[in-house]
Amino acid sequence: MQPYNKYLKLPSRDLRNNMTDAEQMLWQRLRRKQILGLQFYRQKPLLNFIVDFYCPAANLVIECDGGQHFTDEGLEADRVRDEVLVELGLVVLRFSNRQVLTEIDGVVEQIYSIARQKLESPSCEM
């Protein structure tokens, strides 16, 4: 289990109850172990962050990015956040909300492909 800030528990619950349209659409394709039988969690606290989706078995984080992520400040915050998560041995996949809403099959294919690679990698622990 990855460490997390216990003070993020309630905010993560609020985010689960108020997901964006893109997050809801992607969640419908990730939930109930639909991809390689893997369990995904939504709005999961990790360290001092809340990630949109997390799969511990594949060490995979998936982010759905809205417009605020494409500002200079947003891009820098995401870069720092991704660096920290990668240091934990996680792979971070980022998709724009628009990409999720208009190309869901392609997004799911990418997630499937990366998850399969991670599971086949000898360094991945199950």
Image (cartoon, grey):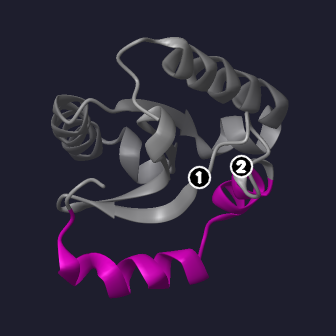
Please tell me which residue lies in front, 97 or 120. Answer: 120
Which residue lies under the disc numbered 1? 40
Residue 20 placed where, x, y %? 63, 65
Could you tell which of marks 1 and 2 lies nearer the N-terminus? Answer: 2
Query: Residue at the spot x=46%, y=83% of the render?
Result: 13
Q: Is residue 32 above or below residue 82?
A: below
- Residue 11: which quarter of the image? bottom left
- Find the magenta span and give its range: 4-28
Quarter of the image where the N terminus is located:
bottom left
- Residue 61: which quarter of the image? top left
Identify the disc placed on residue 68: none
Q: Residues within 10 Å of mark 2 (few under 14, many from 20)?
A: many
Query: Residue at the spot x=26%, y=35% of the render?
Result: 82
Q: Secondary structure at mark 1?
A: loop
The dominant secondary structure in magenta is helix
Please tell me which residue lies in front, 16 or 100. Answer: 16
Which residue lies under the disc numbered 2? 30
**Left or right position of 82 against 24:** left
Q: Residues within 10 Å of mark 1 (few under 14, many from 20)?
A: many
Residue 16 placed where, x, y %? 55, 76
Question: Is 52 within the magenta?
Answer: no
Q: Residue type at mark 2? A: Leu
CB of mark 1 within 8 Å of CB of mark 2?
yes
Query: Residue at the spot x=62%, y=46% of the render?
Result: 97
Q: Residue type at mark 1? A: Phe
Residue 121 placed where, x, y %? 46, 12
Q: Is residue 33 above or below residue 90?
A: below
Query: Residue at the spot x=50%, y=20% of the render?
Result: 118
Residue 41 placed where, x, y %? 54, 59
